[in-house]
Amino acid sequence: MLTKVHTGLDPVPGIWWRPAHKAEKVWVAIAFGWCLVLFAMMPLWHYRGGQNPSGVRRRVEPKAFYARTVAFTNQYKVGEDQGIPIVQPPPGADVYLVGLTFQWYPILKLERGKEYMLHLSSLDVNHGFSLFPLSINFQVVPGYDYGLRVTPTASGDFRIICNEFCGIGHHTMVGRVIVVDATGQPVADNANARVGSGGAR
Amino acid sequence: MTAPSTAAFRICPTTGRTIHLQAERLVKANAVVAVVALLVGAIAALLLVLTRWQAVHLLPAVWYYRLLGVHGMNMLIFFIIYFEMAVLWFAATVLLNARPAAPKLGWFNFGLMVMGTLLVQWAQWSGRADVLFTSYPPLKAHPLFYLGIIFFAVGALLVVCQFFATLVIAKREQTYRGSMPLVVYGAMTAAIIAVITLVHGALVYIPTFLWSVGLIASVDPQLYRMLWWGLGHSSQQINVAAMVAIWYMLGGLTVGSVVLNEKVSRSAFVLYILFISMASAHHLLVDPGFGSAWKIVNTSYFMYLAVLASMVHGFTVPAGMELGMRLRGFTDGLFGWLRRAPWGDPGFSSLVLSIVVFGFVGGITGVTIGTEQINIIAHNTMRIPGHFHSTVVSGTALAFMGTTYYLLPLIFRRKVAFWKLARLQPYLFAGGLLLLVMGMTFAGSFGVPRRHWDISFSQAPFDVQFSPAVDLFLAMMGIGGIIAVTGALSFILIAVKSVFFGEPVTEFARGQAIAGIPQGLTTPPTHAADVDAVNEALHAPARGIAGATPGTLVLVGVFLLAFMLYYFTNWKLLSFLWKIG
């Protein structure tokens, strides 16, 4: 019944398509079952989970996207920090954020518990959107508009780190997102802008 | 077809195999260049890890990014692929007692690869290709950088074709009887995946080269990312297949591992060929260019059938070792076979450490962060290099190192130099990497980005302050990196000393330990004459499901529990985020 005892270095004489021992069959069955669980979790999370990267995606001319972002910024501008405008769009609005070497433009001020359509794209090269300290990460590709419905669930003063290499100044590229509650806390003032101690909040 | 003249061959005094001299020289040349690339990559690694360890922060920004590209190319492309070329020549000729197809073409291809390597090195070191390993356009490098990669890939592709031709020759000239050995079957799997990979390489680098010289107006950044990862990730699957083939080989050489069932192991290799190329979609999970259905289908490689293949090998390799040991009389208890294994044989320790770190750390983290939604909390953080240093470095590179300890006496016919260091080296290398990988993975869990010169953000417009725990994890990474580089440099020292100044291996008496020759050669793990009867008895139905390999069943059970725990913990962490969709 069994093949003659041999190592993986020996040629196999005769027919090697023989039934496996029960132990192997059991392990293959268990492993396959686990693989089905791994597979099922992804569609399941689309129905029941709150965090999915699906979004609304379309091609866009980098310059056109940049122009749209500038228009959006001018429309809802409420202040400025480090020369970068702070923008407070109404809940439900389309929000534009553009990455360009080496800056995230503009600074966003959002309200906790409200949904926004956040559009991400780049003017020049690939960038990486990484919301600190939550570690929410998306790839930002020039020529593509990544529209994500986001609902901030906590207020605070957040940062956007660039986590895709975009040139020698890559490590200086940091943006800002302020999430305020209904009373307007925290205020959008960089004088005491601290993001806590990082990590899980 | 005329029979080859015997003068082209030598008979190995240790194993009795016929070894073709030209093929042997090709194995040697590729292995030597692989070690040189490893040296360059290892020096870069040391400087990089001492820069990312924020408390040390050694290199200036430009040199950090430049050496990051150098490290990636030398380790992931040059070291690994030259070594794989050596493995292909070795598997097709030595293991099949065959002559190589067109050895002169082999030297031409080797020359082409070396020329490509030199072009890439020149472009990177001279600052003409500060685009990192992935070179995502519109970042643009010097045209010769892309051309160098094309030369290298074409040379490698032609060697793969020669490998297939050698298989045909061996079959036609009947240099072996029956079906080819499992190890060669695994190497063939790697070669088939290599064809798929290198075709992607051509698809992506030829247009990019044309773009860099101005013949094409632009390269779509998203399409590039998709095709590039068809090269970038699939090339890691060549490594996986080659590594698993080596697991079977080292198992056989060190402890007399047996193949439990050829059907199961070979089917698992076929699953790799069919499904593993889809894994490249893992890199695009949070990209704007693709919809969720595309992402789910591809990243699950149609229901994780390639993961299934790895889990099958993860059982059959240790179970083969267990059964091999039991058949040689080490039958006490559940783990007597492990306790009495040759832990001082660097081939064996490399094998076990490679399996354990690859499976428990690399496999589990890889499948988890490669899940569509969980990728949101992992993409481009240090969790990614944490993952692939446990697969490709402490998995593949360590398996290659273990193989080298056997190739030195068998092919180079030299004793392994610095034998005491060699016995320690796998533990040093794997131990250092384990620290490095844990440091990277935990730091990444706090959102620390990969490929980033300064996470103190001293030149940024807004302050970013990571948790103090991150400093601890980066120190862990730094110390682990220093230990791992020490392990890699030890390996290089041993290999270079052995090859160029080593003591020649002469005829030796079996059964006694000799410094410089692994135990698997001085005391070959042979089976007794009545081994088939013993095997039948171990497989008797009365022994129940655990059968002949109860120890391995316990080990894979522990593995599955660890997998489930890590996987569902990550879903829980994901659920704490903002609502995104």
Image (tube, coloured by chain):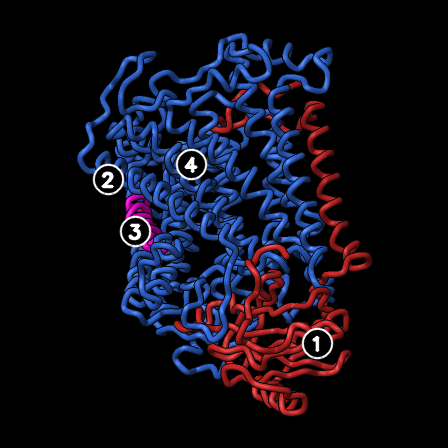
Chain colours: A red, B blue
Quadrant into which the C terminus of chain A falls: bottom right
Q: Is residue B194 visible?
A: no
Picture coordinates of residue B350, whole percent (x, y): 42, 32
Q: Secondary structure at mark 3?
A: helix
Whichever of callouts 3 and 4 sits on the residue coming sooner in the sequence is 3
Q: Are marks 3 and 1 on the same chain?
A: no
- Whether the magenta-drawn stretch holds residue B30 is answered as yes
Kindly report the distance in space between the C-alpha atoms of the residues bearing marks 3 and 4: 19 Å
Identity of the residue furthest to the left in this view: B501
Q: Amino acid at mark 2?
A: Val
Whichever of callouts 2 and 3 sits on the residue coming sooner in the sequence is 3
Q: Amino acid at mark 4?
A: Gly
Residues at marks 3 and 4 touching, judged by CB atoms closer than 8 Å: no
Query: Which of label 3 and label 4 is nearer to you?
Result: 4
Label ID, residue B36: none
Label ID, residue B431: 4
Residues at marks 1 and 4 touching, judged by CB atoms closer than 8 Å: no
Q: Amino acid at mark 3?
A: Ile
Whichever of callouts 4 and 2 sits on the residue coming sooner in the sequence is 4
Q: Are marks 2 and 3 on the same chain?
A: yes
Kindly report the distance in space between the C-alpha atoms of the residues bearing marks 2 and 1: 67 Å
Q: Secondary structure at mark 4?
A: helix
Label ID, residue A184: 1
